[in-house]
């Protein structure tokens, strides 16, 4: 929610991306973050997973084909009009690295390497 002239109004979602054949979804607006969601209950419910802080309007989102990163197109203004402006923002691209959670080791492959640990990258399953 945003406070505009004393009224509480929701932020517009200006970009949506889904990771193909997975239950991961990303949304963006001017709310200072990209939100990652997990689809649940037969794809009828979204559960919040992670907030990725960014400055500016999120005008586009795209997951890589492998799902190892998310690209966000940021701007000072909304892509479809000049209703508002975020002066602190720069028109830019932001690449957000993602990592998969390491699965439990199977008995067939006890020495399988796990994914490297990174506190900066959100976990996806």
Image: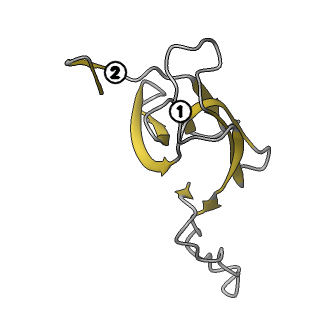
Residue at 39% over, 42% down:
48
Q: Quadrant of residue 97?
A: bottom right
Q: Could you tell me residue 8's position as x and y percent?
A: 23, 20
Q: Residues within 10 Å of mark 2 (few under 14, many from 20)?
A: few
Spot occupied by residue 107 in the image (x, y as percentages of width and height): 63, 80
Q: Residues within 10 Å of mark 1 (few under 14, many from 20)?
A: many
Q: How many marks?
A: 2
Q: Which mark is residue 28?
A: 1
Residue at image x 43%, y 48%? 49
Above-or-below relation of 110 to 88: below
Q: Residue furthest right?
A: 65
Q: Which residue lies most toward the left here?
A: 6
Which residue corresponds to the image point at 52% horizontal and 43% vertical from the top-left? 55
Q: Nearer the viewer, residue 53 or 100?
A: 53
Q: Quadrant of the C terminus?
A: bottom right
In the rendered view of the protein, which quadrant contains the N terminus? top left
Could you say where residue 74 lies in the image, as x and y percent from the top left? 64, 36
* Colour setup of the view: secondary structure
Disc marking residue 108:
none
Asked which secondary structure carries label 2, the reply is loop
Q: State the residue lying farthest toward the bottom.
A: 111
Secondary structure at numbered mark 1: strand
Compared across the picture, whether 104 is left or right of 11 comes to: right
**Residue closer to the observer: 7 or 61:** 7
Q: Nearer the viewer, residue 33 or 77?
A: 77
Return the residue at label 2: 10
Q: Quadrant of residue 103?
A: bottom right
Marks 2 and 1, how far apart in space? 13 Å
Give me the residue at 48% from left, 50% from top: 53
Look at the picture and state if 17 lies above or below 35. Answer: above
Q: Is residue 125 left or right of residue 49?
A: right
Q: Earlier in the sequence, mark 2 or mark 1?
A: 2
């Amino acid at each position: 929610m945003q406070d505009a002239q004393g009224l509480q109004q929701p932020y517009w979602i200006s970009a949506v991306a889904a990771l193909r054949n997975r239950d991961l979804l990303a949304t963006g607006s001017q709310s200072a973050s990209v939100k990652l969601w997990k689809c649940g209950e037969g794809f009828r419910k979204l559960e919040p997973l992670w907030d990725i802080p960014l400055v500016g309007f999120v005008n586009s989102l795209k997951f890589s084909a492998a799902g190892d990163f998310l690209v966000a197109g940021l701007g000072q203004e909304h892509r479809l009009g000049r209703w508002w402006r975020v002066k602190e923002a720069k028109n830019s691209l932001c690449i957000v690295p993602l990592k998969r959670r390491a699965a439990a080791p199977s008995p067939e492959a006890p020495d399988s390497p796990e994914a490297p640990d990174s506190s900066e990258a959100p976990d996806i399953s």
